[in-house]
Image (spheres, coloured by chain):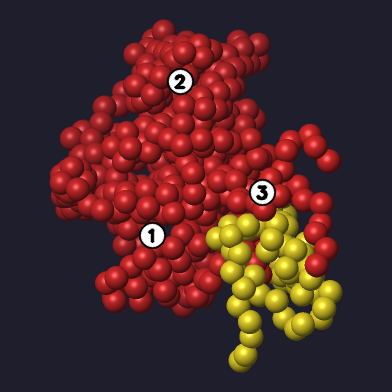
Chain colours: A yellow, B red
Amino acid sequence: MRGVLGRFRELDAAVDAIMALKRARLGDVTVFTPTPRHEFEHAVEPPPSPVRRYMLFGGLAGCVFGYWMAIWASNSWPLVVGGKAIGSWIPYTIFGF
Amino acid sequence: MTTVAYEPRRPNIATADVQLPAVRDYEQVDDEITATLRPTRAWFVALLAAMVCLAVGISAWMYQIWGGLGVAGYNPPVMWGVYIISFVFWVGIGHAGTLISAILYLFRAGFRTTIYRCAEAMTVFAVMTAGLFPILHLGRPWKFFWLIPYPNWRLLWPQFKSPLVWDVFAISTYLTISTTFLFVGLIPDIAVLRDRETNPLRKRILSFLSLGWRNTEREWRHFARAYLFLAAVSTPLVLSVHSVVSFDFAMALVPGWHTTIFPPYFVAGAIFSGIGMVFTIIIPIRKWFRLQHYVTLNHLDGAAKLCLATSLIVGCAYMVEFFIAWYGGVKAEQDYFWNRVFGQWWWAAWIMLTCNMILPLSLFSQKLRRNPTWLWLLSITINIGMWFERFVIVVPSLSHEYEPWQWTTYSPTWVDYSILLGSFGWFFMWFLLFIKQLPVIAISEVKEIVPPRLRHAHTPGAH
């Protein structure tokens, strides 16, 4: 892969260069930086990340699995404890959570 | 090329109000923090001492497996003692780590930046230590996996309404999240170590652990988001895990235990004890590694205020317990609390009240909050006081239930003490190994505090 590497000592100089490259539509811009800076994020204008959707789906799936496992196992081995229902959702919130 | 009007934005992490005037540039941060990884003779001596303590604990456990749980001083009805006390103690120690790394991150409390790595590692090792105690407390410890729901030929399942099963889930979730949180925060720092490493084998290991980190803006963006998500996921865990631990007691119809104040009381106590342990660890580290210009007195001052606040909450909880016992009018409850403070267990209760409620009031003094020697000494008393708090919760209740014929006493044996000593050995062994393999202060977050070099210097207030 071919490209051009630019090295900047100052943060604002690097941000200016990224914005100029974006305006000139000169292909992908990859920024290497020793610390995370919001200035670069605004200059690069990345597309929204799908990670948050994966997080939401994973969280909901895990929660449903927690409730399901506890209710299913309780129904398979139905012992009444403390007068609570076999499928007692309040204590099972711990597993869902 | 047009030049944009420039004003530095707020950093990603909670460093907006932190200043480290003695830290000038990124190279200095890399050099000084990675210098802490060189082993010294004192470190080897400390590691040896920790491993000897661990060996004592393991030997006592082997003796207990051979002789049965009776050698640990259990006599009906006091069937919970040092092991459950120590379990709650170590889970509590872990909580301050998550509070400092997750909740204070979300609240943008700047003083956490240089102490959070230590606190996070402490959390992982404290939960690893706590997880041993329920197993040590089993007569047949090799059956511990019966608490985990897994398909088996007997078609038996754990009782999901039992607080002991809740514990298994709460602790394993906590260990998973806190380990993930620690590891994610370490990735950019491991990449720094990888780039400076000359030993080929270590370089390969560090390359694998850094997941190919290259410092690109895209990686930083995803890193910051992942860290934020993990902080948000960890935050409710700080509250929920010790609430679940408190249910072990609050679900039982035992005087002193069956009360709704237990979850917040346990959570506040856990955070308080954890901050005590953070001081116990971070103050020697900043001295021995000469990191006083990273972990500044301002940071210790901020953590000390948090310690004072949680001490006041814990003290308030003690008072509320006494008040409710009196106001509730239940004879067994009133007798129990009287016995706790003025009767059989007065010495333990007064150690608890002195160490957790009275001595931390000294932190109202700014001079003492900024005195590392005093903070360290106070942290030792907090550790002792919080262990005794759990002693006071566990033992007096079981030894003074409803029926006078049940009233008894309890004294730990050498096996209990040896296993308790072994748990400190186990904890400090892991911690000492950690501080020589990975940076004890977050390199990447400290670098964010260093002001970036600018072509057009920004004057505050000039727009």
Instruction: Give the distance between the C-alpha atoms of the residues marked 3 and 2, in whole angstroms.
Output: 27 Å
Task: Specify the subunit that label 3 lies on.
Answer: B
On screen, residue A23 versus residue B362, left or right, reads right
Element type at marker 1? helix
In this rendering, the label closer to the viewer, 3 or 2: 3
Q: Which residue is mark 2?
A: B370
Closest to the camera, between mark 3 and mark 1, is 3
Q: Is residue B127 above or below residue B324?
A: below
Nearer to us in this view, B192 or B90: B192
Q: Nearer the viewer, residue B51 or B81?
A: B51
Residue ID for mark 1: B144
Whether tag 3 and tag 1 are in contact, CB under 8 A, the answer is no
Q: Dot 2, how many residues are within 10 Å of its Cα: few (below 14), some (14-19), or many (20+)?
A: some
| Residue A59 percent location from the top left of the image | 70, 64
Asked whether the residues under marks 3 and 2 belong to the same chain, the reply is yes
Q: For the residue marked with disc 2, what is the amino acid?
A: Arg
The image shows residue B261 at horizontal and vertical percentages of 63, 28
Residue at the location (70% across, 57% down)? A12
Separation (CA) of disc 3 from disc 1: 46 Å
Q: Name the amino acid type tagged 3.
A: Pro
Q: What SS does tag 2 mark?
A: loop
Tell me the residue at 39%/68% (across/down).
B194
**Quadrant where the C terminus of chain B lies?**
top right
Which residue is disc 3 drawn over? B11
Q: Marks 2 and 1: which is nearer the front?
A: 2
N-term mark: 3 or 1:
3
| Circle 2 chain | B
The subunit carrying tag 1 is B
Q: In x, y percent, where is residue B92?
A: 47, 38
